[in-house]
Image: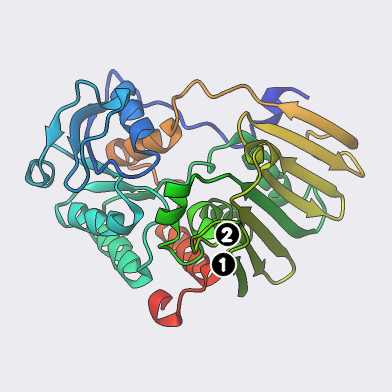
Amino acid sequence: MTRRDLMLIPAVAPLARAAVPKVRVAVYGTGHAHAAAKVATLRALPEFDFAGVCEPDEPRPRHAAYDGTRWLSKREVLDDPGIEMVAVESRVDLNLAYARACVDAGKHVHIDKPPGEDLAGFRKLLADASRKKLGVQLGYMWRYQPAMQAVIEAARQGWLGHVYALRATIDKPIPPKERIALAAFRGGMMFELGCHMIDRAVDLFGKPGKVSGFMRHDGPFDDTLADNTLAVLEFERATADIYVAAHHPNGGQRRTFEVLGTNGSLAARPFSPAVLHTDLKEAAGPYKAGRHTVEFPRSPLPAHGEDFLQMARFIRQGTPLLYSPEHDLAVQETLLRACGYSEETHR
């Protein structure tokens, strides 16, 4: 089995650089954990003209990614017609409002995950952006992970037989200061990291009919963080069990995304570097019968590069974004249901 056999979904291709003008972009906020990496990537990708960073709420961060960057005011970002796209990378409780301001100003928006707690506000953001023909992209970083892509493609192609279950787990030890910040959100670890796996489950199965969440605080810490969490999503003929906790010291190597069917299973484990495990009764597609392991080479693009190239193609060439507003809305609604938000919040 070659790597070419496994690349079942085409990689995001760069733009034709000689013919297409660069997309001028700014970053709004630095409070998200992904902010520094995204600044570095936008500065590195030749498809973008990096305007600078706006930080309206936090002290300016000390990180090499920001060295030499231009610091912008809110008005310099929102009032500059030359800035076509904004990556919103502030704290989760602020990101939706910042994205709202950017869409109101006519900007395409990349907004980091999860997009806040206000489903009605998120729904209106997506509707207004669509009406203005603006792109809104969510920063779910595992959408382009090749082993997960292979798992989902095998399920869609019928190579696993009848698919009846998805099992996913993320365990990550969280330092005390970060625990306190995450405890502000109902669902805790499910809200912070489970959103990634809910995004993958909705991609495969669609919107679930029933969602059950178990948000527990089981760690020996004097805080209220839901640090041992489980979401069970029920579909017409399948279930998805998503488990997220904040305890295992080697949790990164135990992260698993597995889909099971009547012909066997495929699993991505760990997530980085990407490794695929196959366990099939009968050979199907490019996969042999029995148990096999395939390692994927690292992407030549910097972190989050696939997301931003998608946005550049949408802005310059009109290529539809890989995930629709309807998908992103279904993910957010499912996440809030799993975390126990009230019906009024996610109506």
In x, y percent, where is residue 203? 57, 55
Residue 240 lies in quadrant: bottom right
* Position of residue 118 in the picture relative to residue 6 (left or right): left
As rendered, which of 286 and 24 lies closer to the eye? 24
Q: Residues within 10 Å of mark 1 (few under 14, many from 20)?
A: many
* Position of residue 34 in the picture relative to residue 48 (left or right): right
Tell me which amino acid carries mark 1. Answer: Lys
Asked if the residues shown at circle 2 and circle 1 are in contact, with their CB atoms under 8 angstroms apart, the answer is: yes
In x, y percent, where is residue 126? 32, 61
In x, y percent, where is residue 94? 27, 56
Q: Residue at x 78, y 36 (%)?
A: 277
* Position of residue 128 in the picture relative to residue 182 (left or right): left
Q: Rounded to the nearest whole Å, what is the CA distance between mark 2 and mark 1? A: 6 Å
Q: Is residue 114 above or below residue 342?
A: above
User: Helix, strand, or loop for circle 2?
Assistant: helix
- Number of numbered discs visible in the structure rendering: 2
As rendered, which of 148 and 323 lies closer to the eye? 148
Furthest toward the bottom, the residue is: 344
Quadrant, the C terminus: bottom left
In x, y percent, where is residue 323? 46, 51
Q: Is residue 313 above or below residue 123?
A: above
Q: Residue at x 62, y 73 (%)?
A: 212
Name the residue that disc number 1 marks: 207
* Position of residue 345 in the picture relative to residue 6 (left or right): left
Badge number at residue 202 = 2
Badge number at residue 153 = none
Q: Is residue 251 visible?
A: yes
Quadrant, the N terminus: top right
As rendered, which of 100 and 245 lies closer to the eye? 245
Tell me which amino acid carries mark 2. Answer: Val
Reading the chain from its start, which is encountered first: label 2 or label 1? 2
User: Helix, strand, or loop for circle 1?
Assistant: loop
